[in-house]
Amino acid sequence: MLELRDIHTYYGQIRAVQGISITVNAGEMVCLIGANGAGKSTTLMTVSGIYAPVQGSVHFEGEDITRTSPEERVVLGISQVPEGRLVFPDLTVLENLELGAYSRRDKQGIRADLDKIFESFPVLQERRRQRGGSLSGGEQQMLAIGRALMSQPRLLLLDEPSLGLAPLIVKRIFEIIEQINNDGTTVLLVEQNAQLALQMTDRGYVMETGEISMEGTSADLLADERVRQAYLGE
Ligand code: ATP
């Protein structure tokens, strides 16, 4: 479904991503783990089109989308839940969700998807008229995921959904992500919580200073001595 070939993405002189290749198959849940500053977010934003690589290509469902705008990528079926959630604080919960569907014209479909999201996240329905900025961290994460789902993505990109949340809330968020994946949406997940990410996903890539240092099934990575020492604190 998704193929990154030899991607290099720089910020001026800073070589954030230096020649990485990643594939994600339809239906999979794949994670990208690694330390702070390893280049995980940059990689995700190269997939969503926020940053253009200086070298390499991005293919989605067989099509070269390396130069496709972020808006077009949403229409093609790629949606990102950004790090820090970035909900619009002064818009209501409902308005935040409706914005996720900005590229759609099928009013009935939008209504049906809204109902589905309210079913998955009852708290968002209760608070639909409340300002996004007044929600708790966990509720904002749910809102950011709901907003991304409103564009009906086939590939969902998640950047650190556990960031700053209490363990119980993280558990709930990951149950929801698992459900989304079971319902047929492919997931590429960036996480600093390597243990959790590897437990939740099918395959994983480890990033170190802009490069992929290891890859494999999540079960193999979880059992790997180097991963255990470097990322699981053992
Ligand atoms: P984290 O988990 O801390 O978000 P990460 O693995 O996602 O880390 P990136 O955010 O992709 O890493 O950062 C990779 C490198 O690029 C880092 O050295 C970072 O300082 C640098 N970087 C990231 N964003 C920018 C930017 N907008 N301008 C300049 N440098 C940046």
Image (tube, rainbow, N blue to C red):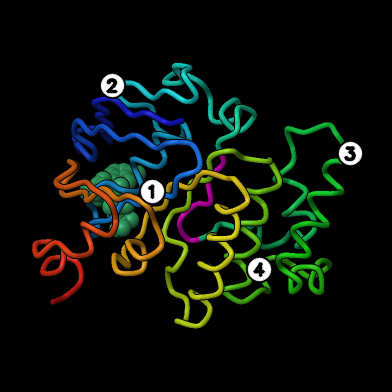
- For residue 63: magenta? no
Give the position of the C terminus as an image quadrant: bottom left
Q: Which mark is residue 56?
A: 2
Q: Position of residue 36 (x, y in %)?
A: 24, 59
Label 2 element class? strand
Q: Which range is magenta?
A: 79-84
Q: Residues within 10 Å of mark 3 (few under 14, many from 20)?
A: few
Q: Tell which of 215 and 85 is nearer to you.
A: 215
Mark 4, secondary structure of its residue: helix
Residue topped by disc 3: 107
Query: Residue at (74%, 41%) from the top-left corner?
Result: 101
* Residue type (three-letter) at the residue carrying disc 1: Val
**Gap between marks 1 and 2, in whole Å?**
21 Å
Q: Earlier in the sequence, mark 4 or mark 1?
A: 1
- Estimate the spatial distance between the alpha carbons at disc 4 and disc 3, rounded to whole Å: 26 Å
In the displayed structure, 54 sits above or below 132; it is above
Q: Residue 196: x percent and y percent?
A: 36, 68
